[in-house]
């Protein structure tokens, strides 16, 4: 490993069927809880009422903050910040998937922010200096890794942008019970699986040194791929779902980016731009462009793509050129995506010629990968 890095992750994880038993001990010193959740799935599965009962029986004052949308918006964050201040909230509990966890983290560092949080944290990349409200997560979907990192992705409809907020603030704890993921539709489960793989690939496909992080990444990717196919066969396979949930944590908690110098992240930048005009499920925006993107940059990082084929997809490289092996690995990835029912074409997300130019204007171009794309190349990927 040649790069310099700092690694710190203070989030406590409670994992398993009895994980919720740890909620009350963790919040014993907090009294006014803002319970943030989405549009009703946690109510349908009974989790909302279970958590609400626990909080009320413990004498907590609960402020309801339901209706957080997928791809939470700038305006919704401002609404949450106002509520947190007015209700003098001392803890935010995010109940649901990655979007709610993202939202909770951004509200926690923005409620008392002097000035515009978008300008401070995204445009100026400032660290929070204001009062921060601690928060925790009760997770129902595996994919984003938001339960164990300090980032939050927010959409700004006015600016037609979607961007990650570096909150520099982690959840105090996250409660993960794989049983809750069994209630998800196949579409969302598999979308989450690809989100996990994409997080790992964004860091993996960068750098040329012999990096321990890459060996770890390969193991997590193999576990994820194996588990996703098991869940495809049996949606109630607890062991497979538990492995997916754990892979998601380690896919974006900083481990696989150590020594990587920032990674690539262009697939996510394109995916975020797509979300601005389609509001599509995040994992599907990534799957729609990934095969074309990696096929385009593969010749510039062929050694790593060959390694990806051999170590992740178990491609036999005997008698084949490096580029043949690399291409075969990407084809294996595409076959796996198709088995899972993932979107592999932009048209399946509702992208039209009319909004293609809006997407292109929203794309941010990174320099961390094996090749920095041009607008013309991004247009080719999106076409």
Image (cartoon, rainbow, N blue to C red):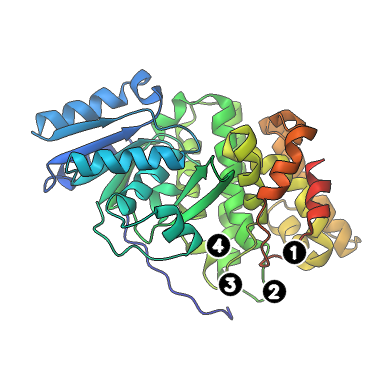
Left or right of 189 on screen, residue 116:
left
Outermost residue to the top: 44
Q: Quadrant of residue 345?
A: top right
Q: CA distance from mark 2 to mark 3?
A: 11 Å
> Are the residues tagged 3 and 4 within 8 Å (C-beta)?
no
Outermost residue to the left: 59
Pinpoint residue 9: horizontal percent, then vertical percent: 36, 62
Q: Residue at x 40, y 23 (%)?
A: 41
Q: Which residue is mark 3?
A: 261
Q: Quadrant of residue 167?
A: bottom left
Q: Which residue is mark 1?
A: 372
Question: Given this view, does label 1 or label 4 mark the residue nearer the observer?
Answer: 1
Q: Which residue is mark 2?
A: 208
Question: Given this view, does label 3 or label 1 mark the residue nearer the observer?
Answer: 1
Q: Residue at x 55, y 62 (%)?
A: 216
Q: Residue at x 75, y 36 (%)?
A: 346
């Amino acid at each position: 490993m040649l790069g310099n890095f700092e690694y710190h992750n203070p989030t406590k994880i409670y994992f398993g069927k009895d994980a919720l038993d740890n909620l009350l001990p963790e919040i014993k010193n907090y009294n006014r809880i803002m319970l943030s959740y989405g549009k009703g799935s946690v109510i349908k599965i009974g989790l909302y009422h279970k958590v609400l009962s626990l909080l009320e029986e413990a004498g907590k004052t609960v402020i309801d903050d339901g209706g957080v949308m997928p791809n939470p918006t700038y305006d919704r964050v401002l609404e949450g910040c106002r509520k947190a201040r007015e209700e003098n909230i001392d803890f935010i509990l995010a109940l649901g998937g990655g979007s709610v966890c993202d939202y909770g983290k951004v509200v926690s560092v923005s409620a008392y922010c002097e000035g515009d949080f978008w300008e401070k944290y995204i445009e100026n990349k400032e660290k929070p200096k204001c009062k921060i409200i601690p928060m925790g997560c009760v997770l129902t979907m595996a994919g984003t890794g938001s339960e164990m990192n300090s980032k939050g992705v927010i959409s700004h409809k006015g600016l037609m942008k979607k961007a990650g907020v570096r909150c520099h603030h982690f959840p105090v704890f996250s409660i993960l019970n794989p049983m809750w993921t069994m209630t998800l539709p196949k579409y969302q489960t598999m979308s989450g699986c690809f989100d996990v793989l994409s997080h790992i690939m964004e860091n993996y496909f960068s750098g040329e040194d012999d990096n321990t992080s890459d060996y770890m990444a390969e193991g997590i990717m193999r576990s994820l791929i194996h588990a996703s196919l098991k869940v495809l066969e049996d949606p109630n396979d607890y062991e497979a779902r538990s492995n997916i949930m754990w892979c998601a944590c380690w896919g974006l908690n900083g481990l696989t980016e150590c020594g990587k110098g920032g990674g690539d992240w262009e697939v996510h930048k394109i995916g975020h731009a797509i979300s601005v005009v389609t509001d599509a499920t995040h994992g599907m925006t990534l799957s729609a462009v990934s095969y074309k993107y990696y096929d385009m940059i593969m010749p510039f990082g062929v050694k790593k793509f060959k390694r990806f084929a051999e170590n992740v997809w178990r491609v036999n490289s005997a008698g084949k050129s490096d580029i043949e092996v690399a291409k075969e690995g990407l084809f294996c990835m595409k076959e796996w995506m198709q088995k899972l029912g993932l979107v592999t074409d932009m048209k399946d997300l509702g992208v039209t010629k009319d909004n293609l130019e809006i997407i292109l204007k929203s794309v941010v171009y990174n320099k961390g990968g094996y090749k920095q794309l041009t607008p013309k190349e991004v247009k080719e990927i999106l076409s």
